[in-house]
Amino acid sequence: MDSTLTNSATQWSTQRNGGLWRPSSLISLSKLSSSSIVDSTLSKIKAKKFERNWDTIVNIVLVEAKHLPPVPDDGICHSLYCKLGLGSEWFRSKSVPSSQNPKWKESFRLHVYQHYVLNISITDKGKMENSMGSCILDLSKYEKERTHEIWQQLDDGYGMLHISITMCAIRSSETTSNCLVDLRDFVKSNKILNDPYEWAVVGNLYVNVIGAKGLISKPKAYCTLEIDNEKVETNRVSPSSEPKWNKCYIFKIYDVTSTLDIKVYDSSLKNALLNKSIGKVSIPLLRISNDLIRWYALKDSRKRSNAKGNCPRIQLQMSLAWNPVKATVKLFQAKEVKYTKKPPKFDLALVYKNTKYVSDLFNLAAEVNEYYKCVFEWDDREYSFCILVGWLVFCYYVRLWNIPLLVLIPFSYQWIFGRHRDNVYIVQDCANDDETKEEKTVGGRIQDLQKMTITITNGIEFIVSYIERLNNLLTFKVPFLSYVAMTILLAASVALYYIPFNYFLMILGIYKFARKYLNPDRELNNDLIDFLSRVPDNIILVTYFSLYIITYN
């Protein structure tokens, strides 16, 4: 028993003096110098700390891929997804149906620590996962504060990937007070406007974001600037209701009718999770005054009233240089569609506004129809006589080349008398902001919606009914009425062959105005509408067909 205890104690003592029997134990570190241990430990701590520090955000929009290898037809539903990796950050995109030209249109937000190498891979997911291609991008060669549209060839030449990349230094405290350079020098050096082979870019926009005032509380504010698919963001500033950025950005302009959308955010944790702006403003590019420093009012999320705060506003200095010829050609091409859009939300105020607008249109059409009838009924003899004389003179002198000039008249009127309007995008008096708010409550809007819905329903039913009647007239649902229409068209064709079109219009006008005296007791009517009303629509046709009874012998 004693010997056993002695052996156990000896073994335990031996384990504690591990250097006698375990050369790889921690005690063997005593042979190393203490300074080398400290240096290696500090270097690891500094490396980890450096990895946690980042000052650049990379916004990536995964748009689409083209000419991918065909997916095997094995009777299984396949889908495609992408993986994006930057350093230790990895993201996976949504899955889309497999095709050779898939579209994702999904955005990702990554951070630059030490590595600037972006890895992207496309995978087909079916019974098994198969790689459809991959690529590697070195982000260090791309300029910051600019949006880059990249078409990257995938490995082995199988297809191409379209991505949009923007890198923004958000923790930079440096300011550029005189960043707005001379546009003429920039255009001359880059030959943007006069390059006969470059028609996609029609101009350039310089924006100097100076600062803001009147923001609610004291946010750690930053703002985003967006034009179509180009988007950048400023650095974060210390908490203040009057932040200063003094950051300058350059945008390529592909359409001069676009707008510059600016949103101000609070970078605190609570607001970062909500991702809700504390103010926004949209500025049409064609309303920009070059080199002028101006204040622009920040609006709420609906852009109908001022945002919360003491009349919040943002100060900008902008300059726009563009080629009118290229911009004009661009107007008749397909408009650029944003890659990412927020899903539409139900908005009672928007429904009310649109419903009221459509209801007012139908009511206006009814009033115009009644006014049209009254003119031909000579309720106001002097006015109807002037209309008749004007119509005859117009029909006598009008020529085909005069029609564009007639359309030009309202443009000329507005150009002469309507150009004095002030710029509505400059800061307005916040005291009068409450006057622009709608007085209707939710209950009142719902009650008005019922009335407007009835008006719209009747108007749409009228339009659909007469479209169906016209279709039934063309398809000989009532052969007699179709024959009558054919006869009238043939007679009109013969009349126009012998009678000049101007005289034909004059005769038609005299007939419409003379009917009151030819038949004083007649009722007000519209000849074309009355004729089409005799043609049954689809609902009436169903009742017609139900009249037939099938008999069996």
Image (spheres, rainbow, N blue to C red):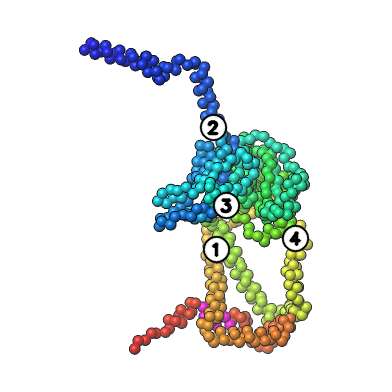
Residue corresponding to mark 4: 418
Residue 448 image label: 1
**Which residue position holds label 3?**
339
The magenta span reads: 531-537
Q: Secondary structure at mark 3?
A: loop
Q: Disc 3 or disc 1, which is closer to the eye?
A: 3
Marks 4 & 3, CB-CB < 8 Å contact: no
Please state which of residues 343 and 216 is positioned toward the viewer in this rendering: 343
Which residue, given by chain and number where applicable, does mark 2 sit on? Answer: 51
* Residue type beneath disc 4: Gly
Q: CA distance from mark 1 to mark 4?
A: 34 Å
Tell which of 489 and 429 is nearer to you.
Answer: 489
Question: Which of the two marks, 1 or 2, is nearer to us in this view?
Answer: 2
Rendered residue at 54%/51% (across/down): 159
Circle nearer the N terminus (2, 4): 2
Q: Amino acid at mark 3?
A: Tyr
Instruction: Look at the image and say whether residue 536 sits in the magenta stretch.
Output: yes
